[in-house]
Amino acid sequence: MEGTTTNVQGSEREAVLSVRGLTVGFGSKVVLDNLDLDIYRGEILGFVGASGAGKSVLMRTVLRLLPRRSGSIQILGADYDAVGERDRMDLDTRLGVLFQHGALFSALTVKENIQLPMREYLDLPKWLMDELAYLKLDLVGLDPDAADKYPSELSGGMIKRAALARALALDPDLVFLDEPTSGLDPIGAAEFDELIARLRDTLGLTVYMVTHDLDSLFSVCDRIAVLGQKRVLVEGSLDDMLACDDPWVKSYFRGKRARSIPRPGNPAASGKVTD
Ligand SMILES: Nc1ncnc2c1ncn2[C@@H]1O[C@H](COP(=O)(O)OP(=O)(O)OP(=O)(O)O)[C@@H](O)[C@H]1O
């Protein structure tokens, strides 16, 4: 199963996720209305939008945790609704998810948390699952002695890394991260961003990242999509965001906070922030 290719700025890119005409609602409330979205292989897509705009609903619908009223969702070239049970299982193993707040099982050690997807989808001997768990810990920058700790014994940053290790347990192609840097201090958040960028570069990972973190958007995201008015309002580069005249996009990307973040071409990088 491979994704469809699309011509983006003169180059062919493979869409690993294509959402078309997606409508999702609860009772009389429509949250997403005729929404389209693409994510291309090997990119980090930063997904932003006002609180309550529907970012989590979209992510959960794509992951089939919520039903949709209409629309199609193609993941890694396959229409999930149309594939058989075996391909469905195969698709599931190629997706990794890091839910907001880590969502590790508190009664399980870090190693057991990482091994959960392996137990669900693979039939591996214990020694191999242990070896794989230590490899994943190393991949996310955790020491081997974290393996036997319980989530309550970890710092916030370690929990995020452990949850990421679990999301990577089955070597996925596409990883969904729901506000991965929320709750981390700026240094911890920057280190986590660097880790995500390194995984994109070394593993060729495609990343769908819901975030409120402007630093993440500016430093690691290859493309940004903004959710508003129940659809993707604008998507593209940071320059595309800066050129957008939508009031929410304007205040988000051109507000005082955004102007204070150092990035290429930003005069505020010199520390001159005026309002
Ligand atoms: N299971 C549900 N039943 C009814 N309404 C829901 C349900 N899940 C979400 N909603 C509603 O859908 C809307 C979008 O919620 P969602 O959690 O996706 O927002 P969000 O963009 O992720 O917000 P935030 O940035 O604050 O996390 C909200 O009005 C929320 O109340």
Image (cartoon, grey):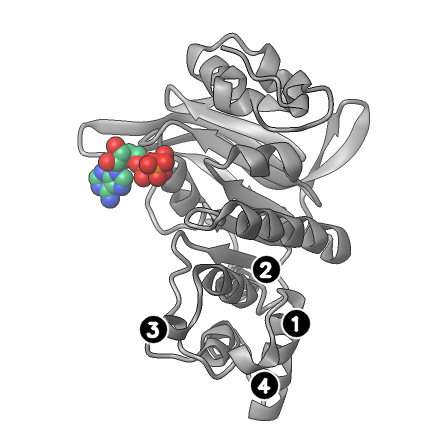
The answer to whether the residue bearing label 4 lies less than 8 angstroms from the nearest atom of ligand 1 is no
Q: Earlier in the sequence, mark 4 or mark 3?
A: 3
Q: Of helix, strand and loop, which one carries label 4?
A: helix
Residue positioned 52% across, 50% down in the render: 176
State whether residue 5 appears in this view.
yes
Nearer the observer, disc 4 or disc 2?
A: 4
Cα distance in 3D space between marks 4 and 2: 20 Å
Q: Identity of the amino acid at label 3?
A: Ser
Residue positioned 46% across, 50% down in the render: 184
> Dots 4 and 2: beta carbons under 8 Å?
no
Cα distance in 3D space between marks 3 and 2: 25 Å
Find disc 2 in the rendering and name its residue: 94
Q: Of helix, strand and loop, which one carries label 3?
A: loop
Q: Identity of the amino acid at label 4?
A: Asp
Cα distance in 3D space between marks 3 and 1: 21 Å
Find disc 3 in the rendering and name its residue: 106
Q: Earlier in the sequence, mark 3 or mark 1?
A: 3
Q: Earlier in the sequence, mark 4 or mark 2?
A: 2
Cα distance in 3D space between marks 2 and 1: 20 Å
> Dots 2 and 1: beta carbons under 8 Å?
no
Find disc 4 in the rendering and name its residue: 130
Nearer the observer, disc 3 or disc 2?
A: 3
Q: Identity of the amino acid at label 1?
A: Asp
Find disc 1 in the rendering and name its residue: 138
Q: Earlier in the sequence, mark 1 or mark 4?
A: 4
Nearer the observer, 186 or 233: 186
Q: Earlier in the sequence, mark 3 or mark 2?
A: 2
Nearer the observer, disc 1 or disc 4?
A: 1
